[in-house]
Amino acid sequence: MEGTEELLKQLKQWSNVAEQRIREIPAEQLYVSIGVLFLTFILFLLIRLLKRTKSNTIVLTGLSGSGKTILFYQLRDGSSHQGTVTSMEPNAGSFVLHSESEKKGKINPVCVIDVPGHSRLRPKLDDYLPQAAGLVFVVDALDFLPNCRAAAEYLYDILTKASVVKKKIPMLILCNKTDKVTAHTKDFIRKQLEKEIDKLRTSRTAISDADIANEYTLGVTGEAFAFSQCYNKVVVAESSGLTGEISQVEQFIREIVRP
């Protein structure tokens, strides 16, 4: 009891001293201090809120037949699932990557959306870009050359969208089906796409702004186009959806959506 009384007495003394010190502070200075503390608290809450609401969505896109849907199922459950069936509707799911399914502890899930590559269905991509944390543009490395121009046009359209540029959404150009002997290398595909986009940039610049849908231009004036000139980060990697060799795309995803 004596110890408790002594503690209460000491607390009362400290309280009196603190009250006296506060009274000695000029009113204006006191109000400023309270205001600073209040703003700091609000800023702290906003930062916490933004961290909690950070997107975990990865959007798969690319031409039809490039292997996006198989890649989706490989990421989700480690199988090709529907084989080579072309997807006509978006596939979407929130899950822990299959390669991490046996890891211990809490692992953050990833929301993956596979957008159909058919030309009539590509406008659906605009529905998902606002929530995208990262983009994976899948390219058929086996049948690349006949589709190079079409792939470059689709890439150009994506890379010049305001929703991509303003948020600087990182993109992975994924050269799929590289398990095949006749598949092109990622370096060859990158160079060919850069050449085609450079041609597109020249031709579309010559058209009136009123006649084109692109919201931004690409590249540096007077220089050949390279992906390093894009507003957002663009990297190139390889994969094989059928064999399950998708480690590079998983690494890209986890650099954006932390486990």
Image (tube, rainbow, N blue to C red):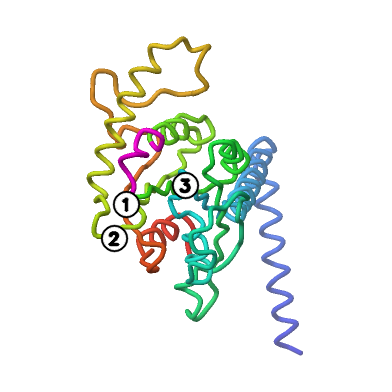
Q: CA distance from mark 3 to mark 1?
A: 21 Å
Q: Of marks 2 and 1, which one's residue comes earlier in the chain?
A: 1
Which residue corresponds to the image point at 52% horizontal and 22% vertical from the top-left?
Answer: 213
Which residue corresponds to the image point at 76% horizontal and 90% vertical from the top-left?
Answer: 1
Q: CA distance from mark 2 to mark 1?
A: 7 Å
Give amino acid for label 2.
Answer: Lys
Q: Of marks 3 and 1, which one's residue comes earlier in the chain?
A: 3
Q: Of marks 3 and 2, which one's residue comes earlier in the chain?
A: 3
**Is label 3 in contact with label 2 (beta carbons under 8 Å)?**
no
Query: What residue is disc 1 on?
Result: 142
* Relative image position of residue 155 (x, y in whole percent): 42, 36
Q: Is disc 1 surrounded by few (<14), some (14 to 19) or many (20+) residues within 10 Å?
A: some
Q: Is disc 2 surrounded by few (<14), some (14 to 19) or many (20+) residues within 10 Å?
A: few
- Callout 2 secondary element: loop
| Residue 229 position by quadrant | top left
Front one among 94 and 62: 62
**Is label 2 in contact with label 1 (beta carbons under 8 Å)?**
yes
Q: CA distance from mark 3 to mark 2?
A: 25 Å
Magenta span covers which residues? 142-151
Front one among 95 and 6: 95
- Callout 1 secondary element: loop
Query: What residue is disc 3 on?
Result: 135
Which mark, by number, is residue 180?
2
Give amino acid for label 1.
Answer: Leu
Give amino acid for label 3.
Answer: Leu
Instruction: Provide the major secondary structure of the magenta segment.
Output: helix
* Relative image position of residue 32 (x, y in whole percent): 64, 38
Q: Is residue 164 magenta?
A: no
